Image: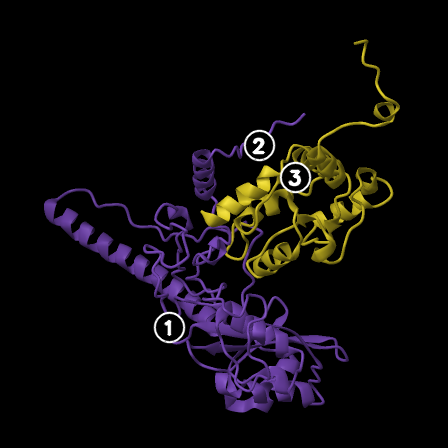
Chain colours: A yellow, B purple
Amino acid sequence: MGVMQPSALEQILITTKVEKVMNWSRATSVWPMTFGLACCAIEMMAAGAARFDFDRFGCGIFRATPRQADLMIVAGTVTYKMAPTIKLLYDQMPEPKWVIAMGSCATCGGPFDSYHTIQGVDKIIPVDVYIPGCPPRPESLFYGFMKLQDKIMSSSLADRYREIFEEVG
Amino acid sequence: MSDAPIPETTPETPSGPFVYDYTTAPNRQVVLPKTVPLPGYRTYVAEQKALVEAEEAKWQKQLADFDTAKAKAEAEGKDAPKAPVKAVAKKNDTDMVFPAPTEAKDPTLLHLVNGLGDKVEEAFEQAGELTCQVAKEHILEALRLCREDAQLKFEMLADETATHYPAAQGFAFSVVYHLTSIARKKRLRLRILVPEGFEPESATQVYPSANWMEREIWDMLGIRFANHPNMIRILCPEDWEGHALRKEYPVVGWGQRDIDFREDRGGMLNRIAMEKAGQLGINLKRPKAE
């Protein structure tokens, strides 16, 4: 038996895991939902515009409907009146879906320690990345988004089973 | 303290889905004001009079004390005590002087008072602003007169709002109507004092712009307006309990904000799932990032 030479097919192919390919495709084409609640939305718009250009990360396509979106950037103060709407929109997003809580208000209520403000959007929906700031600069949003990309890349197909187990209890 | 309805869920015993613990947050307890800071010419005059009378009574008491002390000293053969000196009021140097209300002198206000007759409870000027307090049953007539009279001609209802006075006797709220006359460049404030449960006539019949303002008053303070076309809440959700701008309402609310749509915040279900998966031989642990 001589030395095994790589075949012509192996020279033009890259072998990898299906999971990794799926994660890579998901992480580089996240479509966020247009969901600005307060002044953080201005920074989110600035992040999407030409100077900062969210499109470099493959997520510049802001969808106006939750059914075409993968990512919900909760940008602003979450009031009690808005909470059921947020929950509804989150439920309408197809799996897999992620949530970024942008700014102090969405993470913990911010300065609004009052009767009408939900103290953090994580009381309503699960949050993947929290971005502090009041409001955060577009760079902060990018950093948070890159953290989300890391999370997506490290996610596994077993997560789905984990959620099923959660539902079963 | 007026006879305001006290919420059935007392702060000490949070019930239902509400989890906010008021006992551990004493700094969030409600402190009700003890005074009625409602400005008015009559109350101001009465206050000033009472102040002068108190000063005079104090001085008379000082004199009487001096007389008795003098008689006592004479009887005992000692030196006579010093005669009291009347205290001179200190000059108030602060810039933040509350502008005192004065009698109504403005012709517009006098015309309105004449037109309304005995429906006016009080009319005064303060810092150049005209205020007319009318009887709460006749507010609609007053507004109509303000709008339609050729010498008043207040075309615009600039604002309508209310204030809660829990310490007041006889009334619980004051509702104010800020009128503006664009043609005559004049502003006027109408005021009514409303007890708990009274429904004043809606101003929408004269000024359609009062629609949302009265809804806001109902939402924030709980004053319903009679003959309003759409008397529902405007800011808070329609199932909201309580009225937020009342003085007895805590800033953090009665716990409505502590809603929790996610059941597994503590991670209990997650832990149970991991345990069951371990029993079944499935590895649910998250792989490390490459």
Q: What secondary structure is marked by label 2?
A: loop
Whether residue B231 is situated above or below residue A43 in the rendered picture: below
Instruction: Give the distance between the C-alpha atoms of the residues marked 2 and 1, in whole angstroms.
Output: 67 Å
The three-letter amino acid code for the residue at tag 1 is Gln
Mark 1 or 3: the one toward you = 3
Q: What secondary structure is marked by label 1?
A: loop
Instruction: Give the distance between the C-alpha atoms of the residues marked 1 and 3, in whole angstroms.
Output: 48 Å
Mark 3 or 2: the one toward you = 2
Q: Residue A133: which numbered mark, if any?
A: 3
Q: Position of residue B27 (x, y in %)?
A: 41, 47
The three-letter amino acid code for the residue at tag 2 is Arg
Quadrant in the picture for the N terminus of chain A:
top right
- Label 1 CA crowd tier, 10 Å (few <14, some 14–19, many 20+): few
Whether residue A25 is situated above or below residue B13 in the rendered picture: above
Residue A127 in sight here: yes
Task: Say which chain tag 2 marks.
Answer: B
Q: Which residue is mark 2?
A: B286
- Label 3 CA crowd tier, 10 Å (few <14, some 14–19, many 20+): some
